[in-house]
Amino acid sequence: MKLKYEKPAFLPTLRELVRCNQAFERFSGAHVRMLGLTPPQFDVIATLGNTEGMSCKELGEKTLITKGTLTGVLDRLEQRRLIERREDAADARRTHIALTPAGDALFVQVFPAHLAHLERAFSRLSVAELKQLQTGLAALHHALDKSVAVMNAD
Amino acid sequence: MKLKYEKPAFLPTLRELVRCNQAFERFSGAHVRMLGLTPPQFDVIATLGNTEGMSCKELGEKTLITKGTLTGVLDRLEQRRLIERREDAADARRTHIALTPAGDALFVQVFPAHLAHLERAFSRLSVAELKQLQTGLAALHHALDKSVAVMNAD
DNA sequence: TAAATTTTGTTCTAGTACGGAGTATTGTGA
DNA sequence: TCACAATACTCCGTACTAGAACAAAATTTA
């Protein structure tokens, strides 16, 4: 006979979280690729849009792309002349990243189009559903962050 | 003057979804790596555990790993002698994937440990919260799937 | 049954992803 | 002011990812 443990109650929720994310990546990613960008590239363009530019560190924090990855993403965008790396006058450790005119033109074209695309899916939910989901996700993400903190303080 | 559009109402929800997933990957991934596996490798071991094995196709569907990726993940697990590839007697197109005794030993050790780890985070939410979140996520993921279907039927 | 099509798995390409080592620069405490 | 710690990046190695092209085998269809 095999030892049985209780099936934890959180598994269905976890499963939905993973599936939801997969579905979102598919839906959002497919559209972004049609626009000629990869998802991380789009994130960078979208974050730099309507700003004077920023450091790699700040850009990484906003897009949730880690430093090692960011270098490569920026390399490819720079090659396509959509962004520009400048040295920071005030702090020579920093690199200042900004959209080129071509990058800005792409941003203006692509960003509203992508929002409209996402709206097509999210408008299937009511405002109340969205709000409720947002609350639940926030609770979970705080629970996870707290647990990570506990784990690191071992 | 710049053209302003309404900030769509779904953006905060979307943001939470992304952050939640990030937090989960960090929390779950860190533990899995401590156990000596990458997250996809863990998924494969966990899926094969307590089974007679299965085809690549079935394994891919259960773990949500696409076939192209799966080949590489299986290569590395095979190198470590945790899984075994056998040709299927009935259908020569298929490869039958199963845990080796070493793989099974690892499964028995690692799977309950990881569930216990996850429980530490999820137990911060009430059963009611979990249930509500599950419902919201299911609604969103169906909305996304439906939109993907519409998109593909253009 | 022979040809057309579908299914299954591998290979290839381009692009992430992450942590750690290495480098340059800046800030700080004695 | 000088040693030393902190900061901002880049580069490297390993692994994962989707998607497209492929070969082999099985199934469908004419």
Image (cartoon, coloured by chain):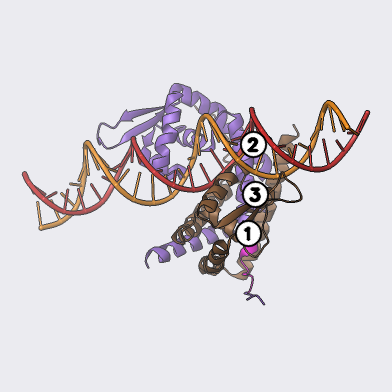
Chain colours: A brown, B purple, C red, D orange
Chain letter for mark 3: A
Q: Earlier in the sequence, mark 1 or mark 3?
A: 1
Q: Amino acid at mark 3?
A: Gly
- Between marks 3 and 2, how big is the CA–CA gap? 29 Å
Residue position marked by numbered label 2 in the rendering: B117
Q: Is residue A41 left or right of residue A150?
A: left
- Which label number is shown at residue A48? 1
The amino acid type found where label 2 is placed reads His
Disc 2 crowd, CA 10 A, few/some/many (<14, 14-19, 20+): some
Label 2 marks which chain's residue? B
Q: Which mark is residue A60?
A: 3
Mark 3 packing: few (<14 Cα in 10 Å), some, or many (20+)?
A: some
Image: magenta residue range: B6-15
Q: Where is B8 relative to B125, above or below?
A: below
Mark nearer the viewer, 1 or 3: 1
C26 lies left or right of A84 = right
Q: Secondary structure at mark 2?
A: helix
Q: Specify whether disc 1 shares its chain with disc 3.
A: yes
Disc 1 secondary structure class: helix
Query: Is the same chain shared between marks 1 and 2?
Result: no
Q: How far is disc 1 from disc 2 in space, using C-alphas?
A: 38 Å
